[in-house]
Amino acid sequence: MTRSVIFGYCANPETLEGIAWLSCFLTTGKHMSFYVSFGTVLLLLAITAPTALLFGFGGASAARSRIAPLSWFGRGYIAVVRGVPDIAFFLFFVIALDQGFEWLRHQALCPDWDEPIRQGNDFVVCAAAKLPLSTADQWVHEVYGFFLAVLTFAIVFGAFAANVLFGAMRAVPHAQLETAAAYGMTPRQTFWRVLVPQMWVYALPGLSNLWMVLIKATPLLFLLGVEDIVFWARELGGSKTARFTDYPHGDWRMWYFLGLLVFYLAFTRVSEIVLDRLMKRLTRGQATAGGEAQRKAAA
Amino acid sequence: MKNLLIGTAALAMMAGAAFAETTVRLGTEGAYPPYNFLNDAGEVDGFERELGDELCKRAEVTCEWVTNDWDSIIPNLVSSNYDAIIAGMSITAERAEVVDFSQNYTPPSPSAYAAMSDDADLKGGIIAAQTGTIQANHVVDTGATLLEFPTPDETIAAVKSGEADAVIADKDYLIPEVEAAAELKFVGEDVPLGGGIGMAFRKSDPELRGKFDAAIASMKEDGTLNEMIIKWLGEESPRF
């Protein structure tokens, strides 16, 4: 017998009705996992967005570098990752990434290993090189899976962000950079003091699009073995027979997915409001149509 | 100080290696009652949970349960994300090319069709089955139109909503579903498919497979496996 962790009267759910039944049903351990998974998704977004932006900034800076190999690297990263379908990337890349890490650790930790690492279909490294160790607690495995997810999302969305930032850097009026050079600034100073502060206003519309797409892409988490809100909605909503649960019900997936719909819509709406404000702030004092309009309104 | 650090690191690694041999991660789907499902507390439960725990006790290993999507359950085994699959997986020649199976822990048991009406067209209609199952292969062989779903639960929902004419799955899975839903009934004849259900291991891991194989054999011998089959799969399910 599994009972609610909150309400004492949930010991015999078959005797309950209406609100009491619902209050017990909605507080089962399984539902708690569902609620926690909302936190997982928000945490993923909170970590992935800045990381992807960092990757994007690195990619864009590399792409416009005057050092040829660095520029090739940046352009290659943008082109390859943007070209590969997301789902292929998520299915293939994560396993490759995980095996890559384990291979590196294997080389470092088990130099005496004499068996091949690839045995037919199997990928076998020594026990000490496993990531995480097979002795580790389940939460370590979950955190590691989450970390791989963040990294994969950051690489994918970083490429798109790199393209947006690359374009934004080119959109900054060239006269600004020439003026900076005329004042005797080095290319580095010009980049950091003139180019970067002005590029955001050009980048924001593209980045805000990316943010919206990123929010909607979080269900891909389940492909990576992280139990996200869509997984739990499907699991909880599926019909349950009385033999396997204290709370039998029919196919309720519609209601759970309706809940997700509301969550995603509310979340994107809040994002829109915040991004609008950010846009107003970034436009201030800029040599753009928006900045001009602000100046006129103030005068 | 440095020596002390190296000493502790070496000790930790040795301890890790010693434990590594006794902690086995079991991968399951968690969506296929009565074999495996998540109970109200969100934990893995069912026939295979009880069986797996008993097997681990007999094999003298500590086990950890992991849930994984059915679609990627074999790729994640061969890339060592867990050490064994115990997920209602029928032993087939096709799968045996990629993984090694233990001996079966259920005898070859029938698959069955369930539908809303007796005159459902099983040979030419639309039949729902879970992706990558022996039942899905069977539907293709019969010439009916296969409608695949990632989870077993969705195959049932497809029949109830009229999207599919019938669903085919392991009979043991369908029995509780048909009992619970008045509009569903078994149609046509049972189909014997597969060589029973077994645990799957990496081909490079014969030692672990041997341990569990011996444990399954001992449970067959003393009758405890039959008791579990009766408890979870019902009196009608074939026994050893």
Image: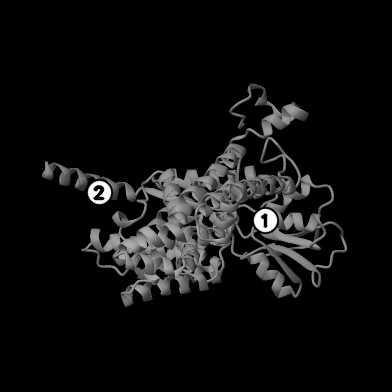
- Pointers 1 and 2 in contact (CB under 8 A)? no
Mark 2 — residue? B13
Q: How is the image coloured?
A: one colour
- Three-letter amino acid code of the residue under disc 1: Pro
In the visual, does B2 lie left or right of A15? left
Q: Secondary structure at mark 1?
A: helix
Residue on which disc 1 sits:
B152
> Which residue is at the far front?
A299
Q: Is residue B154 above or below residue A116?
A: above
Q: Is residue B222 left or right of residue B6?
A: right
Q: Amino acid at mark 2?
A: Met
Image mark 2: chain:
B
Residue A99, quarter of picture: bottom left
Pick the front one: B25 or B88: B25
Question: Which SS class for mark 2?
Answer: helix
The Cα atoms of the two marked residues, 1 and 2, are separated by 42 Å
Residue drawn at x 78%, y 29% as measured from the top left: A18
The structure residue drawn at horizontal position 73% and vertical position 45%, both measured from the top left corner, is A255
Chain identifier of the residue bearing label 1 in the image: B
Q: Is residue B217 visible?
A: no
Determine whether, in the image, residue B123 is placed left or right of residue B217. right
The answer to which of A255 and B166 lies nearer the viewer is A255
Q: Residues within 10 Å of mark 1 (few under 14, many from 20)?
A: many
